[in-house]
Image: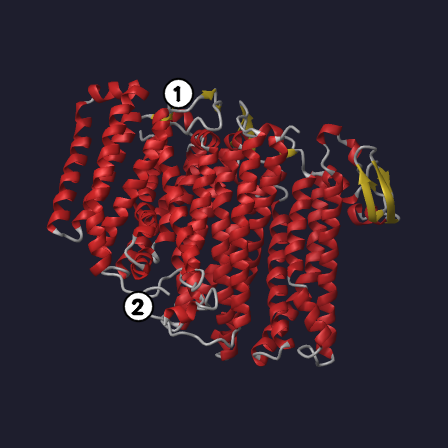
Amino acid sequence: MELDPLLLSRIQFAFVVSFHAIFPVFTIGLAAYIAYLEGRLYRTGDKIYEQISLFWTKIFAVVFGMGVVSGLVMSFQFGTNWSNFSYATANFLGPVLSYEVITAFFLEAAFLGVLLFGRGKVPQGAHLFAALMVSLGTFLSSFWILVANSWMQTPAGFELQEGVFRITDWAAAIFNPSFVPRFFHMGLASLLTAGFVVAGVSAWYLARGRAREMNRKALSMAMWMLLFAAPAQLLMGDYHGLNTFEHQPTKVAAMEGHWETKQGAPLLLFAIPDSENETNHFEVGIPHLASLILTHEWNGTVHGVTEAPKAERPPVGITFWAFRIMVGLGTLMILFALWGLWTRMRGNLDRDRTFLRGLSWFIPAPFVAVVAGWFTTETGRAPWLVYGEMTQAQGLTPSLTGGMALTTLIGYIAVYAVVFTAGVYYVTRIVRAGPDAEEHVEEPQHAKRPLSASDTPFDNDALGAKN
Amino acid sequence: MFDLTVIWAVIVAFGIFMYVLLDGFDLGVGILFPFAPGETSRDYMMNSVAPVWDGNETWLVLGGTGLLGAFPLVYSVYLPALYLGVFLMLAGLIFRGVAFEFRFKAGRSKGLWNRAFFLGSAVAAFAQGAVVGAYIQGFETAGLTYAGGALDWLTPFTVLTGVGLVLGYALLGATWLILKTEGETQAWAYRLAPRLLAGVVAVFVAVSLVTPLIDPRAFERWFEISWLWLLPLGAGLAILKLWQSLRKGYEGQPFLATMAIFVFTYAGLLMSKWPYVVPPDHTIWDAASSPNAQLFLILGVLFVIPVIIAYSAWTYWVFRGKVSLEEGYH
């Protein structure tokens, strides 16, 4: 079998970026939560906020560190596998990605240390300020990344000269047509991810009766936030979908599994798309609903995949199912938020064991939803790398062979397997040790680095070995 | 009129050099790890770089995206050409970073993290040295894309430069340990440094002899511009200074002298290539991004570089003096 460097590079990029994305999507939301906790602490002086913040700051530090490590690969990946794309788009993506690095570094250098190690050593107001700046920094970081991605989806503000994109209008390029919905959709996704993790972990402790007072508070706060954020995401997703419908109709057609352009198109709940024969098998749908959602008209026209020439169609199956996984999980999130409201009104938010168990089992769900969402938007714009301007095949490194791409694909999977296993194992240990774990007294000259924020040992012998 | 592209060349050259110097000594400490006299020594060694290593690596990420922004041709030729080397370097740096974090918290699994720390450091250092060799060799391009094979970068010459940089980083690491440690560890570093220096000088001479054969243009340049010879002269003086200070048992001077060797060597390397940045065909102006992109980015970079320097300086100041096990890093 001939190894296809294009397919292998796509798989490699999808693997690396999916793996990387789960860390920042969590830390962005968690940083906002920590900033909010610090704000409450500052205003009320209630120590319970400090307790919650202390615990989650430790988790934040580890996950942030893993995000930095996995992100290192990202900044070289464009050049190794997509050198033609890098060269053509460098005038825009170079500065934009550099600004992301600058933002992230500035945040780490100036404020992360104060947030992690400054408690009690700097004035409380300064500590709160550091927490706010870390939160702002993580959002700014995602701002630049989403600018880069949105520009590739809906390029603007440029002219092509000899195959190279030159920026003629920076504002138009940065605030390109799909940026605003994408940014807010992703921002809400971060809040939902952090919210469900905090809720799930707090529920896990409550189900075991550990640190009840603190976890009751944390769960309650998370559930209030989710009650607003989960339905808000539904509206934001709709807004984002309409934006895509306007700028990338073929993507929406693939998401909806529509092959032919139709008036009064149905919303498909289930189908097995068949790209070969341009049809679906086992289709189950609600009549007219897709037209209603996308055009807000009963008989509105919805484009089909076949409007695009065969060479310009995305893989419909992946796009269709990834979209359904995301929407399905999003719906479950709303139901969980409502279930929380119902148990709260009955006064047993922290005691309903089915609810608490369910929440802790739900922890992976927001991560899956985020990755599925990215699969939808990234697969759905195939074969374009820069929509309508440059295809994936054109962007590929010309000298890349299938063997090289396969070697590094296997290599990155191996490297990340080790990093991920170690990281998840360690986060699990911190959680098991719990917020009730004994704290060592910090030395004044403690190294200011993310993972040193936690004192939990990596394995059982570690404390013994120290003595 | 000032030329933005030249300013960018200076910024990127500076950034890469900061990376080489700073990550150099902490990679060097990793390379020396298995040869340390004992586990306590290893604790000291790791504590001596723990507070600063990840700040050091920031320069690499900044350099990578800075190249994409200011000299995209360098980015889009070097990375495909060095494809497997880049992978090895990244894998090495990642393993090393993870080992760093978890060794402190490990008991039973400490041996495993020790090995990961050594291997990651050595592989990353070797790959970076091979990049230097590949830069001297030049890259086969067709127009603006890399046209060579997957392993063109791996030649006896680049293996030599790879080994050279491993030795050079080890020397930086050893002199750093002389500065930062006492007792057993320091005595060991004193014994090791002259041997490493001998190795570095041997590679240095070999590379200098082979380079004219590989790159005749550089050879001619050295006879056109006579003041260039001041650079190897400076390197030679720094080598002598290092030798002396090691014999006299000074603590700070060996590290400074080793840094001076790196400064002169790096400057000599750049001067023999200037202004070619993707040798043999493309200069910095061929490789540059459009002026408005360079301008847009320079605003942020000129703001953040002083911040990074100030922050790094502050970190080094806080952790100045001899490293200890108690009040350092757990």
| Residue under pointer 1 | B281
Instruction: Give B245 or B69, whichever is nearer the viewer.
Output: B245
Query: Viewed as shown, does residue B6 lie left or right of A21?
Result: left
Image position of A332 with respect to B67: above or below? below
Indicate the quadrant where residue A342 lies.
Answer: bottom right
Indicate the quadrant where residue A81 lies.
Answer: top right
Q: Which mark is residue B327?
A: 2
Q: Residue at x 28, y 48 (%)?
A: B173
Image position of A381 with respect to B43: above or below? above
How many residues crowd mark 2 within 10 Å: few (<14), some (14–19), many (20+)? some
Q: Chain of mark 1?
A: B
Q: Residue at x 86, y 42 (%)?
A: A281
Query: Viewed as shown, does residue B9 lie left or right of A231?
Result: left
Q: Amino acid at mark 2?
A: Glu
Q: Amino acid at mark 1?
A: Asp
Residue B96 image position (x, y, % from top left): 42, 50
Residue B83 image position (x, y, % from top left): 48, 33
Residue B271 image position (x, y, % from top left): 27, 28
Residues at marks 1 and 2, CA–CA distance in whole angstroms = 54 Å
Q: Chain of mark 2?
A: B
